[in-house]
């Protein structure tokens, strides 16, 4: 089952379970703006494709709540450049 992480790893924006979010196959989680404008659809952590996270129906959230564990890259998430 998806964790439904509560925030964007890049900008720390809150992403409620019903909000649009993007994830990779490891569930790294990004807001739409960071996913498209900064990361260009590629996960900064694993290099995988970012896809729209499915929404969990509200009726199922009571028994299967979203995660409350925040993951945030304090150093930012600008694409790395070659040295």
Image (spheres, rainbow, N blue to C red):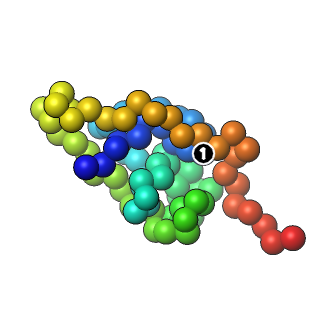
In this rendering, the answer to whether 58 lies above or below 1 is above
Quadrant for residue 25, please give it. Answer: bottom left
Q: Position of residue 54 (x, y in %)?
A: 28, 51
Residue displayed at 41% across by 30% down: 68
Which one is in front, 5 or 38? 5
Residue displayed at 62% across by 56% down: 38
Q: Position of residue 56 (x, y in %)?
A: 22, 42
Farthest residue to the top: give it: 62
Farthest residue to the left: give it: 59
In this rendering, the answer to whether 52 lies above or below 75 is below
Q: Is residue 58 visible?
A: no
Q: Is residue 20 visible?
A: yes
Q: Position of residue 36 (x, y in %)?
A: 53, 58
Q: Position of residue 31 (x, y in %)?
A: 48, 46
Q: Is residue 43 left or right of residue 21?
A: right
Residue displayed at 40% across by 47% down: 21
Q: Is residue 6 left or right of residue 59?
A: right
Quadrant occupied by the C terminus: bottom right
The residue where tag 1 is placed is 10
Which one is in front, 48 or 52? 48
Residue displayed at 49% across by 68% down: 48
SS class, disc 1? loop
């Amino acid at each position: 089952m998806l964790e439904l992480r509560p925030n964007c790893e890049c900008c720390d924006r809150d992403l409620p379970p019903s909000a649009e979010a993007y994830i990779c196959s490891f569930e790294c989680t990004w807001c739409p703006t960071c996913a498209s404008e900064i990361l260009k659809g590629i996960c900064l952590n694993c290099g995988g494709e970012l896809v729209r996270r499915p929404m969990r129906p509200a009726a199922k959230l009571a028994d299967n709540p979203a995660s409350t564990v925040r993951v945030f890259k304090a150093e930012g998430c600008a694409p790395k450049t070659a040295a």
